[in-house]
């Protein structure tokens, strides 16, 4: 108790000396707030899926090659929303702590469901060596670290590898994006996932092509069960949230490297 009070006092002092600001609205944060102010947290564009069976994440992944156990996304992603700042913060402003914070948030969102039941491993979508060197960390791995901190499920970064970087997706159509992510992942340590229930972790699902390619690789190992969790899913999968003018080709204008 004494330690907690002391830590709060130290944080208040540090906050007074070096002010911190909300990554979304840029309002100054209180000492007890972490990267996002309470007001913005209350207004996050949550999907409300909470791991419900048959939600859009599960439906995107359904095909003749994938049997997904569970799927979930915490937020809707809209390229013109201020909430894009969350992704901008950990992808381009070198704030890995933001990804850990939102990893915890998406795990807490599923805390009172059976979503994590029976899951053995968290497998973040790998980043290419080039992007990793440039950024210094893999944002999906940092999201997985946040999920792990809440659930206690270990993170496995050695099973999957990104063998080549896909070119920028900024100007690609949805169909071109699908082809763009073919054969960019490889299962290098099948022994780590054989017979396990793996939860793939990604930051944003747009077409679902990237996560599907990861899924195909993981399913090469024997007896693998697969589930998927992403921080966000593109808004065009949510006609009930944006009922006016949801264009599936909107992806052409989205930022690079979001797949
Ligand atoms: Zn705010």
Image (cartoon, rainbow, N blue to C red):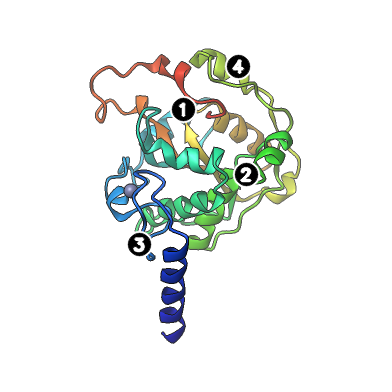
Which label was assigned to residue 138?
Answer: 2
Which percent across, then down, holds residue 188? 76, 40
Please give the name of the residue rendered at 46% of the width and 76% of the height, measured from the top-left corner.
7
Gap between marks 1 and 2 measured at Cα: 18 Å
Some atom of ligand 1 lies within 8 Å of the CB belonging to the residue at label 3: no
Which label was assigned to residue 129?
Answer: none
Instruction: Compare residues 21 and 192 and report the one nearer the observer.
Output: 21
N-term mark: 1 or 2: 2
N-term mark: 2 or 4: 2
- Height in image: 203 above or below 80? below
Please give the name of the residue rendered at 40% of the width and 80% of the height, measured from the top-left corner.
5
Which label was assigned to residue 30?
Answer: 3
Q: Residues within 10 Å of mark 4 (few under 14, many from 20)?
A: few
Q: Indicate the secondary structure of the residue bearing disc 2.
A: loop
Which percent across, then down, holds residue 229? 47, 43
N-term mark: 4 or 3: 3
N-term mark: 1 or 4: 4
Question: Nearer the viewer's eye, disc 2 or disc 4?
Answer: 2
Please give the name of the residue rendered at 63% of the width and 37% of the height, measured from the top-left corner.
219
Q: Residues within 10 Å of mark 3 (few under 14, many from 20)?
A: some
Q: Which residue is mark 1?
A: 206
Gap between marks 1 and 4 measured at Cα: 14 Å
Q: Indicate the secondary structure of the residue bearing disc 1.
A: loop
Q: Which residue is mark 4?
A: 179
Give the quadrant of the N terminus.
bottom left
């Amino acid at each position: 108790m004494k330690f907690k009070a002391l830590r709060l006092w130290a944080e208040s002092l540090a906050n007074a000396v070096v002010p911190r600001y909300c990554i979304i609205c840029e309002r100054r944060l209180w000492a007890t707030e972490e990267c996002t102010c309470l007001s913005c947290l209350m207004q996050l564009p949550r999907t409300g899926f909470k791991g419900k069976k048959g939600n859009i994440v599960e439906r995107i992944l359904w095909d003749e090659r994938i049997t997904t156990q569970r799927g979930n996304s915490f937020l809707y992603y809209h390229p013109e929303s201020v909430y894009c700042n969350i992704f901008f913060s950990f992808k381009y402003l070198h704030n890995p702590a933001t990804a850990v914070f939102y990893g915890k948030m998406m795990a807490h969102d599923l805390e009172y469901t059976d979503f994590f039941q029976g899951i053995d491993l968290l497998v973040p979508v790998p980043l290419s060596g080039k992007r990793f060197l440039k950024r210094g960390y893999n944002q999906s791995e940092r999201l997985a670290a946040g999920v792990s901190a809440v659930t206690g499920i270990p993170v496995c970064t050695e099973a999957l590898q990104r063998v080549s970087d896909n070119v920028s997706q900024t100007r690609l159509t949805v169909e071109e994006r699908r082809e763009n992510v073919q054969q960019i992942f490889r299962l290098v340590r099948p022994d780590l996932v054989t017979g396990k229930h793996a939860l793939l972790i990604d930051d944003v699902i747009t077409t679902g092509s990237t996560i599907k390619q990861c899924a195909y690789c993981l399913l090469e190992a024997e007896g693998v069960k697969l589930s998927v969790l992403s921080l966000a899913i593109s808004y065009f999968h949510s006609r009930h949230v944006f009922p006016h003018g949801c264009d599936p080709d909107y992806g052409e204008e989205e930022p690079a490297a979001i797949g």
